[in-house]
Image (tube, helix red, strand yellow):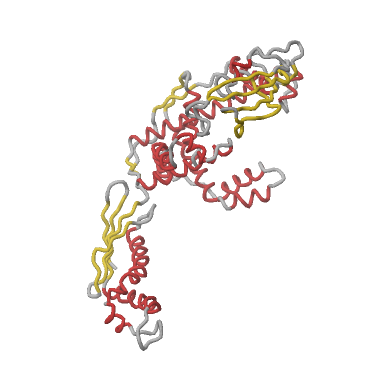
Amino acid sequence: MKTTMERLENSRVRLTVECDAQAFEEAIQGAYKRVAKRINLPGFRKGRAPRKLIEMNYGPEIFFEDAVDILFPKAYEAALQETGIQPVDQPDVDIDEISQENGVTFKIEVDVYPEVELGTYFGLEAEKEKVNVTDEDVDLVLRDYQERAAELVVVDSRTDVREGDYAVIDFAGYIDGEPFSGGAAEDHLLQIGSGQFIPGFEEQMVGMNVGETKDIVVTFPEEYHAEHLAGKEATFKVTVKELKERVLPELDDEFAKDVSESASTLDELKAEIRKTIEDDLERRTAIKLENTLLDKIAENSKIELPQSMVKHQAQHMAEDYLRNLMYQGITPDRYFEITNTTMEDLAANFEEESARRLRHDLILEAIAKAEGITVSDEEVNEEIERRAAEHEGHEEQARKYFEGQKDSIRIMLERERTIKAIVDNAKITEVEPTPASNADSDSDSDSQDAE
């Protein structure tokens, strides 16, 4: 077999693989054994007809398709070994020539693992935001703790419904005098002003009294998810059974003990909150800096990404996105219904970030190779033990799992070491954080956490 290779754009190659007549004849002989089992010729049992007789009746081309199926995998594997390329997708194959006299010539195009021509990667200049945690930041978290610890208590000092109250209600809905599915409930807890119900419903409840029954007339929105209700006027018979209001706990030492496992005073809780915020911001700003440096390296390096790699990565990112939505109770079908999109649309939205992540990964791999950055077996085993120890009571099961992830762990440690080398050799200037820096850091965190 003879192979020639032509490099195309975007890390795609074209291979011309010539298989001589002898190689093709061997494949045809194998094809004959397959084809003969499907041929019925008078005077011969099925599968016993001689090859020459089959060729006389059907032509020699009857064996070509099966012969190609036999020959191509061997020819392709030989071509990969000869050229040393690493395919990242299934090849596109055409037959350029085929005959018993000259053999077969395959034209193969396939996306291959990209080569990276690194630009400057040490000594880069970048800005890193300072971590400034204010008393207001701590108070904001403290108020969130307080809100979550609030209790609903029955209101006995009045009977009228007010904005912000929690009303326990019975309701039954009717359209044209007829009840409809999902339009009734008993002892339903509704916060007035939350917007949980159809527009206009909660506003008409303000001023009602406990024990009162009232007809509330509303119109379902035109874009309402239940098509049989969209745009229709409905009357709800509503009875207020009880009023409740949220009571916030006092911010004192007892509160601190209730919400924290380690703090015994309010001051200790505040210090704990401040440390948590600082650690989180440090992590975010570090990731943002790392991604900034990797983006700079990508700008002055040459990386031709094959489109198939970008699309595969984008598909995985879309699947992860849908998986996270399911944890929030939103199914993929429901998401596509709400957004009026498809899986293809969602994956396409991730392609830009997919390309960015791939460039970062390839850059880190290339720099590690250029700088001789490696991770020993001992270091991998230490990381496995560290991770297993985090699963108290299930260390052995966790250890077995992580043992099966050795290659991924080695790559992760290698990349961590490489990005540290890039940061350590960079010229970093500290700057004050921008108002939108927290949101930006979340986005950058997603990029670096792709591994």
Q: Nearer the viewer, residue 380 or 358?
A: 358
- Say which residue appears at 75% left-offset and 23% top-offset: 257
How many numbered marks appear? 0
Residue 200: x and y in percent read 56, 19
Across and down, in percent, residue 122 comes to 39, 34
**Image side of residue 12 versus residue 255, left or right:** left
Quarter in which the N terminus is drawn = bottom left
Q: Position of residue 4 (x, y in %)?
A: 26, 60
Extreme residue in the front direction: 177
| Residue 242 x, y percent position in the rendering | 73, 19
Q: Residue at x 73, y 17 (%)?
A: 211
Outermost residue on the top side: it is 157
Residue placed most toward the observer, 100 or 210: 210
Residue 420 can be seen, yes or no: no
Q: Is residue 63 visible?
A: yes
Query: Which residue occupies 38% across, 53% down?
Result: 89
**Horizontal relation, residue 440 to residue 259: left or right:** left
Q: Quadrant of residue 218?
A: top right
Q: Along the horizontal axis of the image, is 150 left or right of 71?
A: right
The residue lying furthest to the bottom in this view is: 43
Classify 329 as above or below 436: below
Residue shown at the point (28%, 73%) measured from the top left: 61
Q: Quarter of the image holding residue 329?
A: top right
